[in-house]
Image (tube, rainbow, N blue to C red):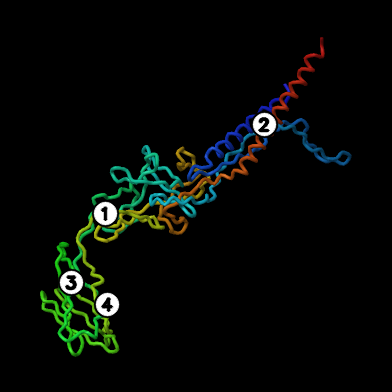
Amino acid sequence: MLRSLYSGISGLRSHQTMLDVTGNNIANVNTAGFKASSVLFQDSLSQLIGTPGIPEDEVGGRNPAQVGLGVQVAGVRTNFAQGSAQATGRGGDLMISGDGFFAVRSGGETLYTRAGGFTFDLTGKMVTADGAIVQGWTAQNGVVNTGQAAGNIVLPLDAVAPARATTAAAVTGNLPSTAAAGDTLVRDITVYDAQGTPSTLSLTFTRTAAGWDVSEPRSGATGSLTFVDGAQPAPGLTLAADGIAIDLTAVTGFATLSTVAVTEQNGAAAGTLKSYSITSDGSIVGTFSNGATQTLAKIAMATFANPEGLEKAGGSAYRASVNSGAPRLGGAGQPGFGSLVSGSLEMSNVDLSQEFTNLIVAQRGFQANARIITTSDEVLQELTQLKR
């Protein structure tokens, strides 16, 4: 049989593979975290029909004469270039800006993905759209130890922020210097003990000839405020009441205005988890009903010595292979790891213009190899008709 017939068949098979890969790229143009692939061709074996010769005195050297036997697919490469960002506004949507993969647990094995569309299920586990559990480290008392083995990220839905006893408070605003002697102003401060039980301290401001006196009846604490051109001389007044340092150094004494008020105190009752946010380093920070914030967990990321050696596992995920190397886990933002962008997803890096060009090239290559087969068939037909 003609060698060209089999060369044409190999060309059809190889270009069919190119069509398959290109078609898959186009089909996943809107798949978050998808990485496009490309086909590499190489020639197949060559048949030696003329051996090389050594140059001699009377005869020159002779080059080998070979006839190729077709084409074959050398490999299918994955392009891990960064995809563009698509803003979604969802706190659970994460995009990796730079190198790295999310580690997820599915079906008893750990897979790796760039698709960061996460949410929390009924039990508080952080999961992908198909139910794989995101891996990371759970915080202990707000502290994350990334030196431990990574595990399932579970949001503690029943988490409680402990109560904080009030140790300091601040009063700001203005006491009117135009007030008559004996005028009083009362401002209440809600404070908390170590159990989170609230109570009230009352600050009574009384106008005097020299300025203002301030007292707290429950504790018996007293002090005096004097002003020079509306401001307190250094160091100002700090009142100690029931072990609470009440800072009044910012209080002024200009005319007319009566705006003195308690602006802050550092105590709080116990609080329940209300919401969460994810920072650029992958920390999941919970916000509690008492205003406290605490790190609850941290998302793990993985890098590989040879990302192109990863094996596609479906669902926009990859698994480690013998040529990818073992995963190296770490936190976002660490050396070698990209940072996270919350509220965005990484889109596919498929270039449609390039893919449609590849589609044309593959189609024409397929047609040309089909023509080789029909031409070889015509030659064989001529041979069979030599004797009639």
Element type where label 2 sits in the image: helix
Q: Of callouts 2 and 1, which one flags the residue occurring earlier in the amino acid sequence? A: 1
Alpha carbon distance from label 3 to label 2: 85 Å
Element type where label 3 sits in the image: strand
The disc label shown at residue 273, or none? 1
The disc label shown at residue 173, or none? 4
Q: Residue furthest right?
A: 58
- In the rendered structure, which amino acid carries the disc numbered 2? Phe
Alpha carbon distance from label 1 to label 3: 28 Å
Element type where label 4 sits in the image: strand
Q: Is residue 262 left or right of residue 375?
A: left
Q: Is residue 379 left or right of residue 266?
A: right
Alpha carbon distance from label 3 to label 4: 14 Å
Q: Residue at x 46, y 47 (%)?
A: 114
- Which of pointers 4 and 1 indicates the residue nearer the eye? 4
Q: Position of residue 54 (x, y in %)?
A: 80, 39
* As drawn, 49 above or below 288: above
Q: Of callouts 3 and 2, which one flags the residue occurring earlier in the amino acid sequence? A: 3
Around disc 4, counting alpha carbons within 10 Å, would you say few (fewer than 14), some (14 to 19), or many (20 or more)?
some
Around disc 3, counting alpha carbons within 10 Å, would you say few (fewer than 14), some (14 to 19), or many (20 or more)?
some
Using the image as rendered, state which of residue 263 and residue 168 is in the foreground.
263
Q: Of callouts 4 and 2, which one flags the residue occurring earlier in the amino acid sequence? A: 4
Residue annotated with mark 3: 188
Q: Position of residue 299 (x, y in %)?
A: 37, 52
- In the rendered structure, which amino acid carries the disc numbered 4? Gly
Q: Of callouts 3 and 4, which one flags the residue occurring earlier in the amino acid sequence? A: 4
**Taking the image as drawn, is residue 176 in sight?**
yes
Which image quarter is the N terminus in? top right
Which image quarter is the C terminus in? top right
